Image (cartoon, helix red, strand yellow):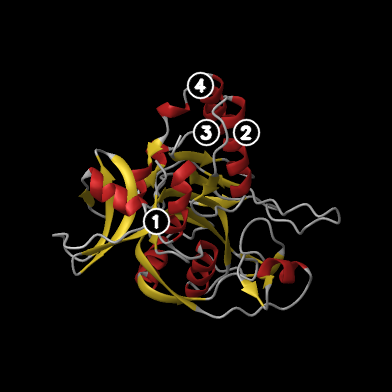
Amino acid sequence: MHGWIILDKPLGLGSTQGVSAVKRVLRQGGYGKFKVGHGGTLDPLATGVLPIAVGEATKLAGRMLDSDKIYDFTILFGVETDTLDAEGVSIATSDVRPTMAAVEAVLAQFTGPIAQVPPSYSALKVDGERAYDLARAGHEVLLASRNVTIYSLSSPVRGGGPAKLVEGGFRERSAGGEPPSTTVQADGGPPPRSGEELAEVTLTAHVSKGTYIRSLARDIAIALGTVGHVTMLRRTKAGPFGLQNAISLDKLDELGQARALEDVLLPLRVALDDIPALSLTPDQAGALRQGRILAGIAADDGQYFAELDDVPVALVEVEDGDVRVVRGFNL
């Protein structure tokens, strides 16, 4: 059991809870104890692709943090919240609603390399403390802008007529601490015409590591002369892993009980599909497993996935014919 299980994370589940679910199923299925980790945090209010590394694949989880991602997300116009999503409370409102033509006109501003200020409610650290802890405690959180890349940003991925905000759809947080609820109703007709005002819009973004979709939604709304927040966020791809590989928690439990998790376990190698393989002889594999450097290898400089007869040996770096281990696998 060394490889990747891809969860289609449901709404409300945290990434660490996804890891715990896989650990529980491995234990209940009698698979034994394995290290388990995730390949990139997905907020509880987000759904979609959550790569779970099992066994030796945990050594590659850090590489997944550096991978690009694809998200579908919905911006509800007219209300900005402190968290920039539906969990927060209203901090700004606007009566301005953009047209589809206006939305499509501003997307080019947010494509390519951009500077972005992360949300105050984020896991970034400020003086050793998480930004969201400081924000929840009422402190003003000022985060530095960061450079990210939006590889592509496209207009609505879903059909349906122009959304209509139901009266009273947004409410302030109650005294009991309940999050606001946003109720949006679509008329089920054809896609909105370019001149119709929109209450919301759904976009697809292909982004680099470190990109905050909530900040992107905030900035798009501001560019449109209004305010907004994210009401739906779904990750459809993380690195090489897409929804076609993902399973639900119910399916995870079902396969665990049937001792059939191997059916959905993706090979460790899949996370390194962007680098070439380097075939080894038994002597070369033995040397790398001992941490030694291989000399005189005829390969271009760069990283390789070194293997012996399809058995992963190490992630290696080749430089001037010398091969050094970056991450070794105990297989």
In three-dimensional space, the C-alpha distance between marks 4 and 1, rounded to whole angstroms, equals: 30 Å
Three-letter code, disc 3:
Ser
Q: Which residue is mark 3?
A: 248
User: For this view, does 286 lie left or right of residue 57?
Assistant: left
Give the foreground label among 2 and 3.
2
Earlier-in-chain disc, 2 versus 3? 2
Q: Is residue 193 above or below residue 124?
A: above
Q: Quadrant of residue 318?
A: bottom left
Three-letter code for the amino acid on which mark 2 is drawn: Arg
Which mark is in front, 4 or 3?
A: 4
Sequence-wise, the earlier of marks 1 and 3 is: 3
Residue at label 1? 327
| Residue position marked by numbered label 2 in the rendering | 24
Mark sitting earlier along the chain (4/1): 4
Which one is in front in this view, the residue at disc 2 or the one at disc 1? 1
Instruction: Give the alpha-carbon distance from disc 1 to disc 3, as whole Å.
Output: 31 Å
Q: Which residue is mark 4?
A: 259
